[in-house]
Image (tube, grey):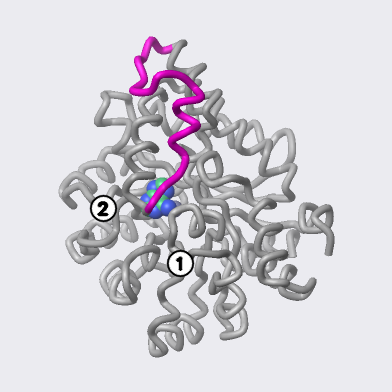
Amino acid sequence: MSERDTRTLPKAELHLHVEGTLEPEMVYALAEKNGITLPFDDIDDLRSRYSFESLQPFLDLYYACTDVLVTRDDFRVLAGAYLEKAHADGVRHVEMFFDPQAHTARDVAIDDVLDGLLDAFAEAKATHGTTGGLILCFLRHLPAAEAAATLESVAHRASDLLAVGMDSSEVGFPAAPFAPVYARARELGLHCVGHAGEEGDPSYVWAALDELKVERVDHGVRSLEDDALVARLVEQRIPLTVCPLSNLRLQVVDDLREHPLRRMLDLGLVATVNSDDPAYFGGYVDANFDAVRTALDLDDDALRTLARNSITGSFADDDRKAELL
Ligand code: ADE
Ligand code: ZN
């Protein structure tokens, strides 16, 4: 299958942080519009910092750039630009992460964040028929009480959300304190997902499953270090939202040729391919497909399986899934 064909393969993107689609040009345009002084000399200085030894240095830059997002329209423009790029990559359904605490901490109203993102989804639906929704992520380096307060602040708008998730620094930040927040999200009718097994060992994935009762594991690449965990993920058909270029750029793997994606498919795991933070990691979803196709020599069947997994692993309703499969 050529790059052209992987692009036209209908697919869903299930692991995409909207704040991670902030391209340097947009960072600078929004900073100027909103009168924000950035901690970089200029756009080239910002670009020169896109090389990361691990997750934390990336997150530090990601949060610094996030500060330029202020108004409802900023969120609409950001998400709209991503949804256009995704459409060109054959993405027909998007389940988009956002980090409300990164915005409310700067006194941005959570309603403006939600409304701006929903405006972009409405436009993409009208223009391209794109479906999907929003996944509100809790920052796991902050106290669970803050996550609970964030969830309660939008409880009356639960129908505007698809799911809750958890992201940010992983190692050293246990999932268990967030169990009551996840239980409350389920009470509100929300699906539950969470980052686990990106840098954290398999115990982090077990905790996401057992404490948070996640329906999908975001990343999960380190699950392969534990056979019993793999057996559970296969048996329960828990999708893993894998992000190959992210794993490379954050040095989770040293070389894409060593990426576990092929082994995941061989083991019968429901693996999907996603872009995570495409503005930072060198490409959107098709760039990720293309990178693993080349590095792992994936054949057409494997590429089709990955695209199908993204649709079956999504929270789209059965009619929409049938349309896309
Ligand atoms: N927030 C944005 N990207 C992330 C990632 N790859 N892991 C954890 N938190 C994130
Ligand atoms: Zn992520």
Question: Would you identify the image quadrant in which residue 35 lies?
Answer: top left
Give the residue at mark 2. Answer: 140
Q: Could you tell me which quadrant the C terminus lies in?
A: bottom right
Image quadrant in which you'd find residue 120: top right
Q: Residue 290 at what x, y percent from top left?
A: 71, 57
Residue in the image at 40% along x and 19% along y: 41
**Residue 37 versus residue 181 in the image, above or below:** above
Q: Which mark is residue 216?
A: 1
Q: Is mark 2 within 8 Å of ligand 1?
A: no
Magenta segment range?
34-53
Q: CA distance from mark 2 to mark 1?
A: 17 Å
Q: Residues within 10 Å of mark 1 (few under 14, many from 20)?
A: many
Which is more toward the observer, 325 or 172? 172
Name the residue rendered at 28%, 72% in the picture: 207
Visible in this render: residue 150?
A: yes
* Between discs 2 and 1, the one toward the N terminus: 2
SS of the residue at dot 2? loop
Task: Write the residue at 38% across / 60% down.
Answer: 195
What predominant SS class does the magenta segment belong to?
Answer: loop
